[in-house]
Image: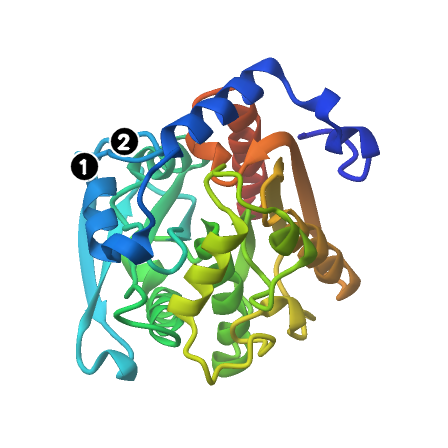
Amino acid sequence: MSGSNPFDPKLYTADAISAETKAINDAIIKAMDGAPDWWDIGAQEVRDARARGEGPFPLAPKSPRARTIEIDGPASNKGGKIALRVIAPDSPKGVYLHIHGGGWTLGAADQQDPLLERIADKVGLACVSVEYRLAPEHPYPAGPDDCEAAAVWLAKNVKKEFGTDKLTIGGESAGGHLSAVTILRMRDRHGYTGFKGANLVFGAFDMSMTPSQRAFGNERLILRTLDIQKFGDAFMPPHVDRRDPDVSPLYADLKGLCPALFTVGTRDALLDDSLFMYTRWIAAGNEAELGIYPGGAHGFVAFPGALAAAANAQADAFLKRVVG
């Protein structure tokens, strides 16, 4: 946890998991028992159910402060627009480009308003969340292309729109993955290395599957091995090399990147992704922090409790520091 040595073996034992976290995990497993899989009933039906607050995640109320900006999409969007959901304080100190999770298949920019409000109020950042196209209707490279287009637009317009040129980026799960991909595309395709920091929360960084992804098994604690496989198949067409750095940033040249915070729980199938990406980020000469949270399931920051509060506080402190 925050302030602990992330490589202390004790953090990874059952004894390190609090009674509260165990109870949260048990409740998640119970809530997901017998729930239909999205690939059986269709992604849109699950998206609609999530929007109604059905499923394992708490319903996130919509912020009355939110507004939408529409920008031009990339060439792969054939003239379509991209919606950016904005929640901002007065006189923001910087901007947080947020990319939501959901396995590249589920989720929406308006389903984490409380998270964005927290960052706006506690860190002083204008939060801009990308409504990127989702698989399987829009497989790779649609989602990454939309996130790149949003980053390009912000890099050009951030000062005019928000009165600051300090740009940060981050997201959860698939959003952590897409954030890393966007940072790399901005460096390699646009020569932009201006991100002040990246908040990468239980991201997927190896689409060929890390050992923890393969070994997790079938326990319905948000994300099983089978879920990872199905999400990957929906997102990536068969011809895509799953170790191409544009889909698996773990294999990219990571030199010259911004400071990053990697956050993950020990009961997450994506544990290795953060452990491996953190060490590669450091080995490339970049600054990084690693937050390990005992017993945290995939998505744990969305569930009320001390573990989520500690992780969110570490993220807020990191973002405050990198924007000065």
Secondary structure state at the residue bearing disc 1:
loop
Query: x%, y% of residue 320?
Result: 54, 39
* Residue drawn at the location 45% of the way across and 36% of the way down: 123
The residues tagged by marks 1 and 2 sit, at their Cα atoms, a distance apart of 7 Å
Q: Which residue is mark 2?
A: 59
Tell me if I can see residue 167 in this picture: no
* Residue drawn at the location 20% of the way across and 50% of the way down: 45
Q: Nearer the viewer, residue 85 or 264?
A: 264
Tell me if I can see residue 195 in this picture: yes
Up the image or down, 275 lies above or below 244; here it is above
- Binning the other alpha carbons within 10 Å of mark 2 as few (below 14), some (14 to 19) or many (20 upward) gives some
Amino acid of disc 1: Arg
Secondary structure state at the residue bearing disc 2:
loop
Please state, as top left, top right, bottom left or bottom right, where the C terminus lies in the image.
Answer: top right
Q: Could you tell whether 127 is left or right of 269 in the image?
A: left
- Mark found first going from the N terminus, 1 or 2: 1
Please state, as top left, top right, bottom left or bottom right, where the N terminus lies in the image.
Answer: top right
